[in-house]
Image (tube, grey):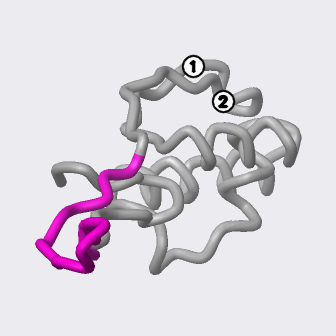
């Protein structure tokens, strides 16, 4: 999964470079994806995910990885993030 955020599904977009003479050539807009380790409060361990900078801000705004995953839609999450979400749900149900 190259250049795709594992939490939001944000990926590469395509567009045009437009010169002053209005010549158009194709280009790619790459998301700002970073490899980060996010800590899960309920599981007590961290997970390594490829996350965009915007998603990282969203995780902090929602109050951590656990709360973000519980609010997130499954179709936007990667398979690893879906696995973590299931574990968080189990831990929340047990508590």
Where's the C terminus, which quadrant? top right
Sequence order check: which comes first, mark 1 or mark 2?
A: 2
**Residue at the spot of label 1:** 45
Q: Quadrant of residue 61 in the image?
A: top right
Residue 87 picture location, percent across and down: 56, 49
Which residue is drawn at the image coordinates 26% and 79% (left, top)? 22
Q: Which mark is residue 66?
A: none
Q: Is residue 22 magenta?
A: yes
Label 1 sits on a secondary structure element that is strand
Q: In the shown orientation, is residue 78 left or right of residue 66?
A: left
Q: In the shown orientation, is residue 28 left or right of residue 35?
A: left
**Residue at the spot of label 2:** 40
Label 2 sits on a secondary structure element that is strand
Residues packed near mark 2 inside 10 Å, few (<14), some (14 to 19) or many (20 plus)? some
Q: Which residues are magenta?
A: 15-31
In depth, the one of 64 and 33 nearer the eye is 33
Are the residues tagged 1 and 2 within 8 Å (C-beta)?
yes
**In the image, is residue 64 above or below residue 16?**
above
Residue 4 picture location, percent across and down: 31, 55
Which residue is drawn at the image coordinates 18% and 64% (left, top)? 27
In depth, the one of 52 and 68 nearer the eye is 52
Which residue is drawn at the image coordinates 22% and 62% (left, top)? 28
In depth, the one of 14 and 44 nearer the eye is 14
Residue 38 picture location, percent across and down: 57, 26
């Amino acid at each position: 999964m190259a250049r795709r955020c594992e939490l939001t599904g944000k990926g590469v977009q395509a567009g045009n470079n437009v010169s002053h003479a209005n010549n158009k050539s194709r280009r790619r807009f790459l998301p700002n994806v970073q490899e980060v380790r996010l800590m899960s409060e309920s599981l007590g361990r961290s997970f390594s995910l490829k996350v965009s900078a915007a998603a990282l801000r969203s995780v902090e705004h929602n109050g951590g990885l656990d709360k973000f995953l519980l609010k997130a839609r499954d179709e936007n999450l990667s398979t690893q993030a879906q696995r973590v979400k299931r574990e968080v749900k189990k831990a929340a149900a047990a508590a």
